[in-house]
Amino acid sequence: MDIQALSEKFGVNAERKQDGGFPVFEKNIRGKRVLLVADRTTEQFLPSVKGIVERNAAESAAFVLPSPEPVADEETVKRVVEAGRTYDYLLAVGAGTLNDLCKYAGFLTHTPSGVFATAPSMDGFTSGVTPLIEKGFKITRNAQTVSDVLMDFDVLCRAPRIMIGAGVGDILAKYCCLTDWRISSFLTGETVNEEAYSLMHQAVCACDASLEQLLRGEAEGVQKLMDALLISGYSMVIAGNSRPASGAEHHMSHFLEMDFLRRGERIPLHGVKVGLGTMVSLYLYHTLARRPSFAGKERVRAAAEHLPASEYAENILAQFACPTRFSQLGVSRETVRTMFFEAYKIRDRFTVLTLYCTRGLMTEAVADELLERFY
């Protein structure tokens, strides 16, 4: 699939650095007032793009959030909105949270935004929604799709290994969430958007096929990962929601994220938590044969036949230095046990976890089995 043509279809300039610049982006910001938004971790990358902006913008400045790992909560959103109020364009210099903050601040102020990607660590670059923390709860708000995604593969290939692993975790998760979507059509009558489903599935398979290159640190592997991450956003736009990109594995991640927030602890990378949830979802699908019967069981089992084994995801993620046990995140055993029974309530969306919890399959014995395997 041609990522450039696909991006143009959705009105996004997904541009790779060439000859020291980003010609299309430079044309887009010519004569505008541009604010670069970074944090204490990503401010090191400001020089990579600051000169390009200064040569083309009528006015530019940098706004650096004081935290090395900001959270997209009400207060931080307010700070970005206030900082960007007099500017025509917001450019996030970073990845997940900074992109989310600029997309949402731009949405609130009717200001275009873009991102200079510093790591291939998550799939929200091109989505039209933003996950936020409001009153301690993880929610998803409508935002805007970025105008530009700027990719310097010298920067992306040097991203910390675990951040690349987080991106891989977010992509491997699509195997599960797409299957969640399909089984929901069998069991609840939910409509599957076949265009979004097919686009996301093709991207996951292409990325999976290039994992060996990615593990070797080759640029082509990073490019395939970035393609899949961008396509994830486009599939969400087509579907009109996050269904093609988020299922039980994301609900487990969100459940844990709120636990970290309640405890005032640093939140592990989104894709790291999602990767662990992916391992659990794959295990739940592949062990359905020995679970009690329920209406539609054979159709669900058939839909899950194509899924990779939980051990496959575990092996891949371990090679990217990602945690493969929940205990490695610093979360309690009891919290993880509760997650198995409660995380499906995070969203009104049928998933493999919903199946287990509403069909009597998630027993104390099964929870013990999962804890033994994944904690």
Image (cartoon, rainbow, N blue to C red):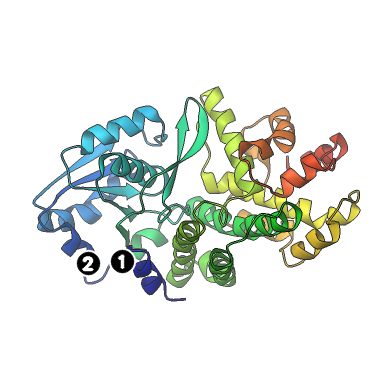
Left or right of residue 100, residue 352 in this image? right
Q: Which of the two discs, 1 and 2, labels the residue nearer the N terminus?
A: 1
Give the structural element (helix, strand or loop) at label 2. helix
Q: Which residue is mark 1?
A: 15
Residue 211 location (% of width, % of height): 56, 67
Q: Is residue 353 visible?
A: yes
Name the residue type under label 2.
Val
Name the residue type under label 1.
Glu
Give the structural element (helix, strand or loop) at label 1. strand
Residue 349 location (% of width, % of height): 64, 45
Residue 24 - label: 2
Left or right of residue 307, residue 41 in this image? left
Q: Residues within 10 Å of mark 2 (few under 14, many from 20)?
A: few
Quarter of the picture holding the C terminus: top right
Work out whether residue 137 or residue 298 is closer to the camera in this orientation and state it. 298
Q: Residue at 28% across / 36% down in the picture?
A: 80
Residue 65: quadrant of the picture: top left
**Residues at circles 1 and 2 in contact by the CB criterion of under 8 Å:** yes
Q: Is residue 323 visible?
A: no
Work out whether residue 328 or residue 188 is closer to the camera in this orientation and state it. 188
Residue occupying the far bottom of the picture: 1
Q: Is residue 60 above or below residue 233?
A: above
Work out whether residue 104 or residue 348 is closer to the camera in this orientation and state it. 348
Q: Residue at 55% across / 65% down in the picture?
A: 200
